[in-house]
Image: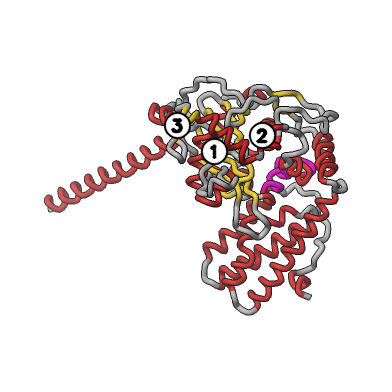
Amino acid sequence: MRKVKRKSKNILKHLSIIAGLFFLAIAGILVFVFNIFSEPSDEFAKKNSATTFSPFIRTGTNTIVNRKQHELDNAKKAAGNKEFSIIRTSTDFNKDIPFTVDKKAGVVYKKQYNGRRINICVTGVDSRIGSNFKHADANHVLSILIDKGEIEITSIPRDTYADAGMPDTTTQNIIAVLRPAKGRKAYLNRIAQIAELDTIHYYMEFGFSQAMGIIEWLGYDNSKQTLQVLRSRKVFGGGDWQRTYNQGKFMKQAMLKSFNNYGGMFGDLVLMGGLSLTETNLTSGTLNAILKKLKESDFGQSEDVTLRVRPEFPYDYKNFDFNDKDIIAHMSAKVDQYSGTNPGSSQVSTDSLVINELRNAVRKAIRSDSSGQATLTINTLKTYFQQKAWLQITDKNTRHHYRETIKNLLVSAYKKKKEPANAEKVQQLIEQESNLFLNNKNKSKPEFESDLELIQ
């Protein structure tokens, strides 16, 4: 009997040791994970501090050249020397739009920082509605200097040199083409190199539709006008360099505006909704931890965000106030004037194009769903769903209709294929997106009574 008791005690003792080791392991993992956002880690600080890069680079012809000059020469070639020649001069086209001048964004100032750095690549991809082909049209890196409570925004023109595997006789060896030609990993590596960073930790990608949704979510009155201005490269002088700077400036102003004014943005539900508009490896928990650390550092002043344009190119960048809706409207009118279109007509054209495209896709999906062809239904709608194509529609009721119709058809198709996880994912993503726009005041009757009206 004593042997049995002794044996039982030994078993319990071993189980206690195993349990203790298990919880110690879990605790160790949690300490390691959350140490990124708490006390400084020498290993993390070393890994993410600024690196001294060689001023030289070996080209494809095995020639050693100046790295910055090489990148600049290739960017000039890609942009076209004629277009590049006007970059150094001002244009009178927008002289009546108020702006200040930023002489520092394109110049390298040595700022020593040895703390932890979290690098997030933000990419605006340019792909046609319904197409999976993605050029990297807008390229930016948010570097969170977590110990300092500051952010650096590094903006990179789409025509910056990158070996996309294209013939040297073309102008296609640029960062915009590298993303579709060689994939995300090669793209992020090249972005880190241009920005003079060790690595990119996280990425966020979104297309035209998602960008409109994000701009609307951030509280800008006319997302179409705002995006039209941010995409323009010919109207405001400076070519792609000025356009890239404009996008970085907008990100800075939107970031500070949201951080200071919307305390609710720190809630996981809202963050998940915002992330649902992008393709990303960031989680709401990670983003929430970053934001909390910034808040603890009293982040929120203009000087807490630094703008950089790389490759280095000294230029007097025009610094516009994108928080002023009158300036946005004025700039949008300039874009319309330059392109020879009537103000506002492009939005009507966009709405008509997107509605027609979605109507045809939904009709096809309804037919395949009715005939039990679940795979065809999914293939017909999947790209539109990933692009959040309905966000390009101005009328909120019509937008809501197509979003719900596409969601219901995809959920039905995935359930028929016995893929409940995918059905739940679709349902969850739409629910997260809906949470972003709960304050929508347009509650009138939807334009369409039912999905069946679309196939009459």
Question: How far apart, in angstroms, are the residues tagged by discs 3 and 1?
Answer: 31 Å
Circle number at residue 241: 2
Asked if 317 appears above or below 164 in the picture, the reply is above
The C terminus sits in image quarter: bottom right
Q: Position of residue 448 (x, y in %)?
A: 80, 66
Q: Earlier in the sequence, mark 3 or mark 2?
A: 3
Residue occupying image coordinates x 70% and y 37%: 82
Q: Earlier in the sequence, mark 2 or mark 1?
A: 1
Question: What residue did someone put label 3 on?
Answer: 64
Residue occupying image coordinates x 56% and y 68%: 414
Residue occupying image coordinates x 58% and y 34%: 73
Circle number at residue 120: 1
For the question of whether residue 289 can be seen, the reply is: yes
Kind of residue at badge 1: Ile
Query: The residue tagged with tag 1: helix, strand or loop?
Result: strand
Q: Position of residue 57 (x, y in %)?
A: 46, 32
Residue occupying image coordinates x 73% and y 32%: 86
- Tell me where the magenta segment starts and ends, as one range: 211-222
Residue 19 appears in which quarter of the rendering? top left
Asked if 178 appears above or below 289 in the picture, the reply is below
For the question of whether residue 272 can be seen, the reply is: no
Which of discs 3 and 1 lies nearer the camera? The answer is 3
